[in-house]
């Protein structure tokens, strides 16, 4: 057993979407480390067939991330040297929840982990931290975090990331790293692919917003989890730790693609191909978004099209992951096509 | 549609054709080379075998002009032996295998081609070629000999390869290897010469980086896709079975009307395969400093991407040899003088392909991803969309593009001059027409 072997890992938010993929990737390590999960909600009763890990080998710790006692207990009983923090509320929650989990929770975790002499913390940040609505062309980690954030979610993620990075303290043997995945999808995903399926079901897939020249990153959750395992290993290995600790890394599938090409691929995999596509250009779609927002408000319904959503689907948002490839040795193992196939297979399980 | 009508319906191309014909000046007009009788004959042979290629070669820097011309003629001679079905293999194989050693002889010729072989003069008058070849710098001679040896043996191997002759190319790896012999090697030789002349960055001919291989393969694969009907009529084919077998039982099935759709999917799959070379092509072009060499390398590449877009999803490919318009060629020749122009040409045709791609196509996502990948690469070449305060990444390609941009700006001056003269000429022409009209009333 070499020094970079992960012996015991504590996965904060391990019951969530990315959490299950983290369990999977850590469980594939040889020798398999002890895997502990800390979450507010228990592990799902039924695990998708897309996962092969044995749930009985996982130790579960229920608790509140903002409670020092809960976190301390989990770290101490697990004896974990590595903590992976991927707990994050879904987009669409209230500012209060974002603050609580992303800011207070992360702060609490860092304090307790350091007190408990944990060696390293791997934090799941988000590529959204550099997004403020402006186009992002092939961004690397030198891009600044905008002064005015896109929304409360990205704002709190950026604050948490900053806390994580500044907690990096090699002299006291406490190392941190932040990974910034972009557009995570995969089995367990509640947003990207299911959202698209919903659009097709409502018969809205024949509308295309924007000219479809904007590149977009989608990242398979299993690949994101891979990057976390690599980050943990690099932090535990004394020869590589100095290169990666205190650093951020964009994580993508390294295949940015046109937004609508991905959407149509999902619909096609579902057996749905539109014979004719109606293209709404960006300014027109934004105007339509305002109208839709206005009338939905009158009718007291949730608007389908909003100016915000139009801007999101028309923006260029793709990243350069040379740093992760070079320093973490990261390579996406599951390509987009296979990723979509697995996601749809999971959805068809009806879990 | 007649040529004139074709030009008139594409005004930008008409403009390009007029500019090319009347306004563009050669890069080395004042170089007078003492011509021997042998050299004159070589020029004639060059024009005889390829009119378009002759024009580009004659524009090359004097340092490389003859070397490239003779390289071309020697390979053309080799090809003429290989291609001629009237030559008995017992004679043909040894000639191909020993062709490189003939280059050392003071004089040698071959009279064994059939009377109908249109390029037989190249072999009959081979002594003229040899005389001029021996005047070249020894290092250029060495390159020509090395590549001739490899290519001659490669050709002989393919002639003897029963499986290849009977069943064509099997895997994509076979396809790449075949293209290596017929085109990759040419790129190899030309690149060695460019680097020897000091016209490209030194890493262009590197043991580990085979960018020239992609230059050759991109051209060759585009031709192979386009030539489907012509090759089939000649009873041969170079589409790899690994790809076409996904869409048909027999390669010839695509020519039947009921299989057109499958044929189109197959073409598009082959286009996808050819596109994998584009990033290296752009990298290669960014590495060339000398302007005439840049144009020499860029013209075939931009014509290839235009052709690739023409064959994409084009049912005509199944029945005839499609060709890009003459006017398009003029436009491309003028625009490809700068790296920026080349990049814009590639981007234009890639987006055009993307626009015509249908969701039903089995390669739909892969083509989208491949085109995106090239777009991302182009972004990394220029890095012009960075937010305030972010410095460009000083990658190898970025630095090369930056260097190349300096050379581009010199061409821009020439382009502006041409544009000015064109506008002046055009205004005079209009005034003249107006005057004639006015007085004739």
Image: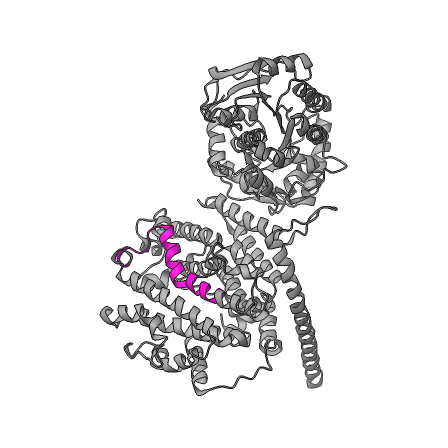
Q: Is residue A216 above or below residue A51?
A: below
Query: Which residue sits at x=34%, y=75%?
Result: B102
Q: Residue at x 51, y 48 (%)?
A: B370
Tell me residue B16's x, y (percent). Answer: 59, 71
Q: Position of residue B302 (x, y in %)?
A: 53, 62
Query: Is residue B77 toward the left or the right of residue A142 in the image?
Result: left
Answer whether residue B230 is magenta in the image: no
Taking the spot 73% from the left edge, 32% from the top edge, the residue there is A294
- Residue lying at the far right in this picture: please name it: A147
Q: Which image quarter: residue B138?
A: bottom left
Residue A145, percent from left and from top: 72, 37
A242 or B143: nearer the viewer: A242
Q: Is the stretch drawn in magenta largely helix, strand or loop? A: helix
Query: In the figure, is residue A167 to the left or right of B325?
Result: right
- Res A152 seen here: yes
Viewer-side residue, A140 vs A147: A140
Q: Is residue B177 magenta?
A: yes
Q: Report the span colored magenta.
A: B165-191
Q: Quadrant of residue B416?
A: bottom right
Quarter assignment of residue A229: top right
In this view, A100 is above or below B61: above
Q: Tell me if residue A169 can be seen.
A: no
Residue A56 in the figure: left or right of residue B24: left
* Colour convention: one colour
């Amino acid at each position: 057993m070499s020094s970079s072997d992960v012996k015991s890992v504590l996965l904060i938010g391990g019951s969530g979407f990315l959490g299950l993929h983290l369990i999977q990737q850590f469980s594939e390590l040889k020798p398999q480390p002890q895997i502990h999960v800390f979450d507010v909600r228990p592990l799902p009763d039924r695990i998708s067939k897309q996962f092969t890990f044995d749930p009985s080998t996982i130790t579960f710790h229920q608790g509140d991330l903002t409670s020092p006692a809960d976190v301390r207990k989990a770290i101490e009983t697990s004896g974990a040297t590595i903590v992976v923090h991927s707990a994050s509320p879904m987009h669409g929650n209230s500012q209060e929840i974002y603050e609580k989990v992303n800011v207070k929770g992360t702060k609490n975790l860092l304090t307790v982990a350091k007190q408990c002499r944990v060696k390293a913390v791997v934090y799941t940040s988000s590529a959204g931290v550099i997004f403020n609505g402006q186009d992002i062309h092939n961004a690397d980690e030198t891009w600044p975090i905008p002064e005015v954030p896109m929304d409360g979610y990205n704002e709190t993620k950026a604050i948490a990331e900053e806390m994580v990075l500044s907690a990096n303290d090699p002299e006291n043997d406490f190392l941190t790293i932040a990974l910034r995945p972009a557009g995570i999808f995969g089995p367990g995903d509640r947003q990207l692919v299911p959202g698209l399926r919903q659009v097709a079901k409502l018969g809205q897939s024949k509308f295309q917003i924007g000219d479809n020249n904007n590149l977009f990153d989608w990242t398979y959750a299993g690949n994101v989890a891979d990057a976390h395992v690599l980050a943990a290993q690099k932090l535990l290995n004394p020869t590589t730790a100095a290169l990666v600790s205190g650093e951020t890394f964009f994580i993508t599938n390294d295949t940015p693609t046109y937004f609508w090409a991905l959407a149509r691929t999902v619909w096609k995999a579902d057996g749905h191909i539109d014979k004719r596509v109606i293209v709404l250009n960006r300014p027109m779609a934004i105007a339509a978004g305002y109208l839709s927002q206005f009338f939905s408000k009158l009718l007291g319904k949730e608007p389908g099209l909003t100016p915000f959503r139009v801007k999101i689907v028309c923006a260029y948002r793709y990243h350069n992951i040379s740093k992760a490839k070079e320093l973490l040795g990261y390579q996406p193992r599951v390509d987009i096509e296979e990723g979509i196939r697995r996601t749809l297979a999971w959805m068809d399980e009806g879990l | 549609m007649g040529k004139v009508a074709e030009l008139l319906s594409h005004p930008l191309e008409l403009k390009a054709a007029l500019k090319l014909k009347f306004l563009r000046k050669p890069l080395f007009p004042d170089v007078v080379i003492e011509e021997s009788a042998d050299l004159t004959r070589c020029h004639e042979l060059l024009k005889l075998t390829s009119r378009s290629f002759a024009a580009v070669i004659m524009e090359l820097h004097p340092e490389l002009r003859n070397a490239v011309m003779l390289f071309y003629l020697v390979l053309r001679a080799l090809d003429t032996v290989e291609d001629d079905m009237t030559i008995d293999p017992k004679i043909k194989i040894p000639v191909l295998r020993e062709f490189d050693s003939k280059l050392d002889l003071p004089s040698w010729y071959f009279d064994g081609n059939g009377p109908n072989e249109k390029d037989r003069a190249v072999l009959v008058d081979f002594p003229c070629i040899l005389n001029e070849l021996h005047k070249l710098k020894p290092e250029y001679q060495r390159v020509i000999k090395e590549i001739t040896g490899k290519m001659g043996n490669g050709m002989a191997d393919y002639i003897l390869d029963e499986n290849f002759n009977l069943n064509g190319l099997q895997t994509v790896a076979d396809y790449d290897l075949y293209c290596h012999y017929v085109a990759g090697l040419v790129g190899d030789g030309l690149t060695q010469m460019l680097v020897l002349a000091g016209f490209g960055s030194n890493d262009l001919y590197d043991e580990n980086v085979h960018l020239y291989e992609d230059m050759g393969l991109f051209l060759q694969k585009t031709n192979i896709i386009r030539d489907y009907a012509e090759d089939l009529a000649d009873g041969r084919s170079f589409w790899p079975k690994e790809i076409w077998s996904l869409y048909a039982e027999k390669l010839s099935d695509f020519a039947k009307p009921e299989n057109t759709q499958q044929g189109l999917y197959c073409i598009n799959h082959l286009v996808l395969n050819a596109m994998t070379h584009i990033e290296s092509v752009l990298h290669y072009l960014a590495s060339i400093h000398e302007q005439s060499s840049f144009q020499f390398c860029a013209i075939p590449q931009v014509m290839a991407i235009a052709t690739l877009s023409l064959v994409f999803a084009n049912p005509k490919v199944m029945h005839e040899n499609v060709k890009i318009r003459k006017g398009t060629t003029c436009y491309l020749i003028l625009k490809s003088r700068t790296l920026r122009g080349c990049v814009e040409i590639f981007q234009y045709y890639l987006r055009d392909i993307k626009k015509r791609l249908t969701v039903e196509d089995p390669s739909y996502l892969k083509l989208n991803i491949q085109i995106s990948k090239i777009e991302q690469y182009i972004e990394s070449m220029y890095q012009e969309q960075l937010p305030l305060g972010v410095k460009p990444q000083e990658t190898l390609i970025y630095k090369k593009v930056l260097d190349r941009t300096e050379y581009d700006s010199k061409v821009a001056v020439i382009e502006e001059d041409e544009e000015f003269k064109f506008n002046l000429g055009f205004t005079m022409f209009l005034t003249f027409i107006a005057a004639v009209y006015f007085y004739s009333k």
